Amino acid sequence: MAIFRWGQSWDPFHDLEQELDRLLQSVHQTFHMVRSARNFPQCNIIETPSAYIVTAQIPGVEARSIEVTISAGCLVLKGIRRPPEESREDSYRRRERFHGAWHRKISLPDRVDEDNMKADYSAGILRITLPRATPGRARQIAVNEGP
């Protein structure tokens, strides 16, 4: 009898994660270590002729707790998801949405105009517009002969 059912995915860690999820569904405890490897927030990156548009699903997060930075070709999203006020750790029967600090680092495929990027947050969706940088023109560099 096979222990794992290998799906259509070619990523064995994804298959292992799915199997662990299936096995742990009936347990009414939180397994932070198992769930912490998941990418949060889930993002889509759309390429247009003039910009990259990144959308991220971040339900339950306040706009003031979201930080968006860009440096060295990477977009970094950080924030905190606070637990509901009425919840206590010992009152959960099932908990699939985590609370606490999170961050996501996304490599960008090309240079962007960092001065004109903008971010909007509405209805749990963060939308970041990253205009493409204008290509620099070639510049001649003089070669000096050493002493």
Image: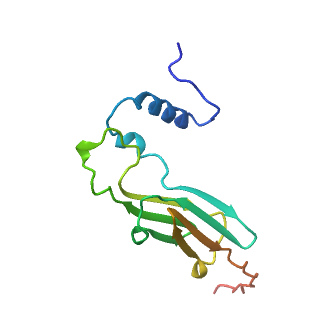
- Is residue 115 positioned above or below 27 on the image? below
The residue depicted at 43 percent of the width and 68 percent of the height is: 66
Q: Quadrant of residue 138?
A: bottom right
Q: Which residue lies furthest to the top in this view?
A: 1
Q: Which residue is drawn at 65% across and 32% down?
A: 8
Side of 70 relative to 92 (left or right): right
Residue 49 locus on image (x, y percent): 76, 70
Q: Nearer the viewer, residue 11 or 18?
A: 18
At a point 69% along the width and 85% down the height, the residue shown is 145
Quarter occupied by the C terminus: bottom right
Relative to 59, is 7 above or below? above
**Percent x, y for residue 88?**
24, 49
Total numbered circles: 0
Left or right, residue 58 beside residue 130:
left
Q: Where is residue 105? Give x, y as percent.
A: 51, 60
Q: Residue furthest front?
A: 86
Q: Which of 119 and 90 is in front in this view?
A: 90
> What is the basis of the colouring in this image?
rainbow
Dividing the picture into quadrants, the one containing residue 33 is: top left
Asked if residue 32 is positioned above or below residue 137 in the image, the reply reads: above
- Say whether residue 119 is left or right of residue 89: right
Query: For the point 65% across and 84% down, which residue is it?
Result: 146
Residue 144 percent location from the top left of the image: 69, 86
Is 84 drawn above or below residue 34 in the view shown? below
Left or right of residue 85: residue 119: right
35 or 60: which is nearer to us? 60
